[in-house]
Structure formats: structure tokens, C-alpha cells
Image (cartoon, rainbow, N blue to C red):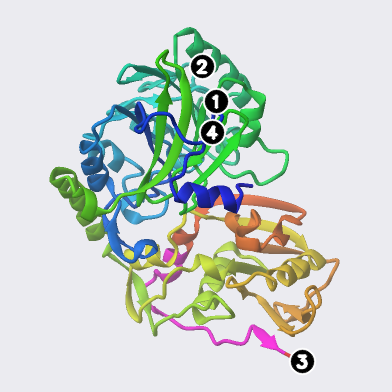
């Protein structure tokens, strides 16, 4: 876990030193920079950003303008997860990056498990057509490095040789279909072998781009453990975390940085070398991309705007109609949550469905509902998963969910009496499922998202299931099917959660 103190120092732009005895570098300016983006998640345009007082920030056009103002040599790298959270990104399956970002001077890039959502066939074409190479140190297809990729990169920032390798976590292919001949080899072995190659090639700095992501269990490989296991890595550029804020950590001599998501800034690492070309310090800064400070590249801005116009035209197509507006509620039951849970349960032909309220990000309007409305409602690529659960486990999962702030469980097929003032673990008094009392020993079919199964925002109890199956069908698809058919969808009555004393 990255400490708050270290994060605080990072955001004050103080140096996180690797090699010197004191944090203050001996020279005023670095010798060169590393710039790093990751987890753009389809938000590739400049926009008012609430985190920065609604100042217009971010996007590929501002990033390019920022880079054009640099006077020191640099290397620009990209860590993957380009499109999963917006229709503008998803409709092109990530292809937008090959066009809108083509004029940016990226030296190399990586993909994450989220970029495999449409299968290896789709991603392999993006890799093949990419205007800059993918670095894939532990990924092969048909036993070979994929076309458009290379296993390592030796590039220069001014007079300094920068060695770059990149790995994808083996969990990226687990549970996914249409993977073809894609193979992901052992991460530690691949890193150890590639570090040796780069050292032999004369790299003065060794940089690892890592798409391991957040570990769901304590035994999973993390960037910190990788730094401990493999000597010789100077900097790990971490991606696939999906967190808004930048983060930094130091493990031994290795600096681990994460630049934050959605491209409102760029990770900046200043590299300091002595007169013999030896790396002495590395300083991380979360560089916010304010348009007021750097301007905007007009050609890239227009390319981005054209992609967004095309996406909006597709997304303005009607998905269905609602009799009245559906509004969500993070703190309790809502008409929107009841409707969405009903959609999932009916599609899954399940005994019950449970959703977390925080995943429902916008209300739905009365009257015509467009495809864009559904993306705003559910901007995630979560899949519906079937669980076989004993009644006791289901009750415990719902009970645990009552401890999660601002993320109330939305249910279908269930009714529960509960006392919100009772001690944790003893709040639910009585549950029925499909009109009958919940049996502790009976096995029920429950539909949730894979996000919920993984403990989404604190709803951890659903992992205690006898069996589960990921359908690979996205939540938005189910909601869209629920609205189809030409009839106005009705609004369910509240009352599935009843407060009792």
C-alpha cells in the first residue's frame, strides 16, 4: 500500500530519490524526462475537470501542445487501457488511438486485459496498424512476437540510452474468449531475461511498463514484489489500476509510479545523470495538463472532435422508451436500481439479482432513451456472472453490503426487512426470495456483475459461492435488451428493502 505521506510528497513535486544520499539533486534541471500515460479509458479530449476546479484539462491535443513546449530530451510511453469507459473509446475498440494520437511522439506502448475485451483478433489488428511499436516482453501469438510489436526497446533521450521492456499479467487471458494463439508467459522470468539483454545492450536506465494491475489476492504478483524479485529495474511505470490520482512508491532502488487515469495529466519523471552517464536521481511529478498553460494542438483537437461527433451520431439512436424518469440513490433502494436489477434477473432467468448502486452513474430520462443514455448510466465494461449460492451465503453477502457506505445493494427477486441501526452483521431480520422465506441450505441462482463478484466497492461476500460462470455479456447489452420491444418500460414500485426496528 502506498503511504499517504509518500503521496503527499509526490503531489508537492518533491523528489523521490533512488540513488543519491540526499533528495536534492546536484543539478538544477534533469538531464532528460520520461513521460508516461495510461488508463486513458476513452477520455481523450480536453474538458472541464471537477478535480481541478472545472479548469479545462487533459486530452491528446493538450498533451501534444505540452510536449511541443519541452526543451529537454524525453521519451514518451503509454501503458494501455485506452477505451473501456466511454462510447467514444469503445465504439472504435481502441482504434481511435491509432488515428488521434498518431502525431504524438510515443516511443512504445502496451495493452492491458481491458483492451482484450473484443478478443485477440481485434487487438492484434490495432497492434499491427499502430503508428508506434508495442513493447511485449512476455506476450506471443502463435509462438512469435505479434506483428507490430517487439520484445524490448532501446531508445535515446538526448545522449542517454533508455531500455524499455513491458509485461502483461497472466490473468489478462483468464476467463476470456477469442484469444486464438495468444500466450502470456511468466512475468518474473520474462523481466529477468529482458533486463539482462538491455544491460548487455548498454542501457543506462531500465524502465519497465507493467500492466499487472491491482492484485485481488495477497499471493498475486505486484509491481512491488517484482521490484524485489528482479534487480536492475530503475523505474516501473504502472498501468491498469484505473485510479484517478497519481501514485508513487519506492522499493529498494526501484521507483514505481502510476500517472492516474483519464488523461487529465501526464506522469513526468526527471532523470538525473552524473558526468559518467550514471543515473543518480529520478524525480516524479504529476503534471496536470491545463489548457490555459499549454494550449491545444488544433489538428489533434479536430481529429478528436470528429471521432466524438461520429460516436455521438451512433449513440443518439433510440434504445427504447421509459414511462417516467428513473432516478438512482447511493444510500438506499431506488427506482433506477430496482429496474436495472429486474433487467438482469429476467435476462439471466435467475432467482435473484444484486447490483451495487455506485455502478449506476446517471439517471435515465422519461420518454426516449438513447444508446448514449445507457453509456452514461453504466460506463463500465462489466459482464453478467451467474452464481450458485447457498441461502446462508447470500444472506451474509447482503449483510456485508450494508456496511459499505454510498453503495447500497439494489436487488431483484428479494425482499428484506432490516434495521440500519443494529450492529453490523445483525441488521437483516428477514429475507424472502420469490415470495418464499430464504432457506439457509437451499442453493439459489444469483446474477451479479463480475465487478460485484470481485468485491466491487466493498461487496465482498459474493465470492462465497459454490460455482460461478462469467457470461461475457456486458451489463449495457442486458439493459439495452430490457428496453427493446417497442413498449414503454414501466417503473417498479419501491419496497424491496423495508426498514424495521
Secondary structure of the residue carrying tag 4 is loop
Measure the C-alpha gap from mark 3 to mark 2: 64 Å
Dot 1 or dot 2, earlier in sequence = 2
The residue under label 4 is 22
170 vs 165, left or right, is right
The x and y percentages for residue 464 are: 76, 56
461 vs 494, left or right, is right
Q: Are marks 1 and 2 in contact (CB under 8 Å)?
A: yes
Q: Is residue 496 magenta?
A: yes
Secondary structure of the residue carrying tag 2 is loop
The residue under label 1 is 183
The residue under label 2 is 143
Dot 1 or dot 3, earlier in sequence = 1
Reply above or below: 457 against 217.
below
Number of labels in the image equals: 4
Give the quarter of the image for residue 201. top left
Q: Which residues are magenta?
A: 479-499
Q: Residues within 10 Å of mark 4 (few under 14, many from 20)?
A: few
Secondary structure of the residue carrying tag 3 is loop
Nearer to us: label 1 or label 3: 3
The x and y percentages for residue 251 are: 62, 34
Residue 486 visible within the image: no
The residue under label 3 is 501
Give the quarter of the image for residue 30. top left
Q: Residues within 10 Å of mark 1 (few under 14, many from 20)?
A: some
Dot 2 or dot 4, earlier in sequence = 4
Dot 4 or dot 3, earlier in sequence = 4
Nearer to us: label 2 or label 4: 4
The x and y percentages for residue 50 are: 36, 65
Residue 274 visible within the image: yes
Give the quarter of the image for residue 403. bottom right
Amino acid at each position: 500500500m502506498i503511504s499517504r505521506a509518500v503521496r503527499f510528497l509526490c503531489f508537492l513535486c518533491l523528489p523521490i530519490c533512488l540513488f543519491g544520499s540526499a533528495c536534492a539533486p546536484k543539478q538544477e534541471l534533469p538531464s532528460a524526462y520520461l513521460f508516461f500515460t495510461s488508463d486513458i479509458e476513452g477520455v481523450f479530449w480536453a474538458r472541464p475537470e471537477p478535480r481541478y476546479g472545472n479548469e479545462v484539462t487533459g486530452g491528446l491535443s493538450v498533451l501534444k501542445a505540452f510536449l511541443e513546449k519541452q526543451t529537454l530530451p524525453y521519451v514518451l510511453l503509454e501503458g494501455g487501457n485506452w477505451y473501456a469507459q466511454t462510447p467514444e473509446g469503445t465504439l472504435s475498440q481502441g482504434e481511435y488511438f491509432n488515428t488521434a494520437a498518431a502525431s504524438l511522439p510515443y516511443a512504445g506502448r502496451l495493452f492491458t486485459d481491458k483492451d482484450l475485451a473484443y478478443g485477440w483478433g481485434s487487438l492484434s489488428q490495432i497492434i499491427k496498424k499502430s503508428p508506434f511499436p508495442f513493447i511485449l516482453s512476455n506476450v506471443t501469438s502463435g509462438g512469435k512476437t505479434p506483428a507490430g510489436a517487439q520484445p524490448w526497446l532501446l531508445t535515446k533521450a538526448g545522449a542517454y540510452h533508455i531500455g524499455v521492456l513491458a509485461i502483461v499479467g497472466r490473468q489478462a487471458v483468464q476467463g476470456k474468449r477469442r484469444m486464438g494463439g495468444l500466450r502470456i508467459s511468466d512475468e518474473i522470468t520474462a523481466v529477468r531475461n529482458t533486463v539482462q539483454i538491455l544491460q548487455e545492450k548498454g542501457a543506462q536506465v531500465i524502465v519497465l511498463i507493467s500492466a499487472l494491475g491491482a492484485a485481488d489476492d495477497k499471493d498475486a504478483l505486484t509491481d512491488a514484489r517484482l521490484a524485489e524479485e528482479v534487480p536492475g529495474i530503475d523505474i516501473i511505470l504502472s498501468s491498469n489500476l484505473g485510479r484517478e490520482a497519481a501514485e508513487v512508491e519506492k522499493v529498494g532502488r526501484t521507483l514505481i509510479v502510476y500517472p492516474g487515469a483519464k488523461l487529465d495529466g501526464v506522469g513526468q519523471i526527471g532523470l538525473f545523470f552524473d558526468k559518467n552517464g550514471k543515473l543518480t536521481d529520478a524525480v516524479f511529478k504529476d503534471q496536470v495538463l491545463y489548457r490555459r498553460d499549454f494550449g491545444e494542438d488544433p489538428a489533434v483537437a479536430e481529429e478528436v472532435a470528429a471521432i466524438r461527433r461520429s460516436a455521438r451520431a451512433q449513440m443518439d439512436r433510440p434504445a427504447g422508451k421509459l414511462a417516467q424518469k428513473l432516478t438512482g440513490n447511493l444510500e438506499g433502494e431506488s427506482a433506477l436500481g430496482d429496474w436495472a436489477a429486474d433487467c438482469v434477473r429476467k435476462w439471466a432467468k435467475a432467482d435473484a439479482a444484486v447490483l451495487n448502486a455506485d455502478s449506476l452513474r446517471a439517471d435515465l430520462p422519461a420518454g426516449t432513451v438513447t444508446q448514449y443514455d445507457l453509456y452514461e448510466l453504466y460506463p463500465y465494461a462489466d459482464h453478467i456472472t451467474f452464481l450458485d449460492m447457498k441461502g446462508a451465503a447470500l444472506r451474509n453477502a447482503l449483510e456485508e453490503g450494508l456496511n459499505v457506505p454510498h453503495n447500497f445493494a439494489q436487488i431483484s427477486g428479494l425482499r428484506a426487512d432490516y434495521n440500519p441501526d443494529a450492529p453490523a452483521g445483525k441488521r437483516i431480520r428477514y429475507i424472502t426470495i420469490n415470495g418464499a422465506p430464504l432457506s439457509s441450505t437451499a442453493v439459489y441462482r444469483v446474477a451479479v456483475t463480475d465487478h460485484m463478484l470481485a468485491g466491487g466497492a466493498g461487496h465482498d461476500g459474493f465470492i462465497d459461492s459454490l460455482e460461478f460462470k462469467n457470461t461475457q455479456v456486458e451489463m449495457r447489452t442486458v439493459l439495452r435488451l430490457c428496453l427493446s420491444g417497442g413498449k414503454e418500460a414501466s417503473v417498479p414500485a419501491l419496497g424491496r428493502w423495508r426498514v424495521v426496528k
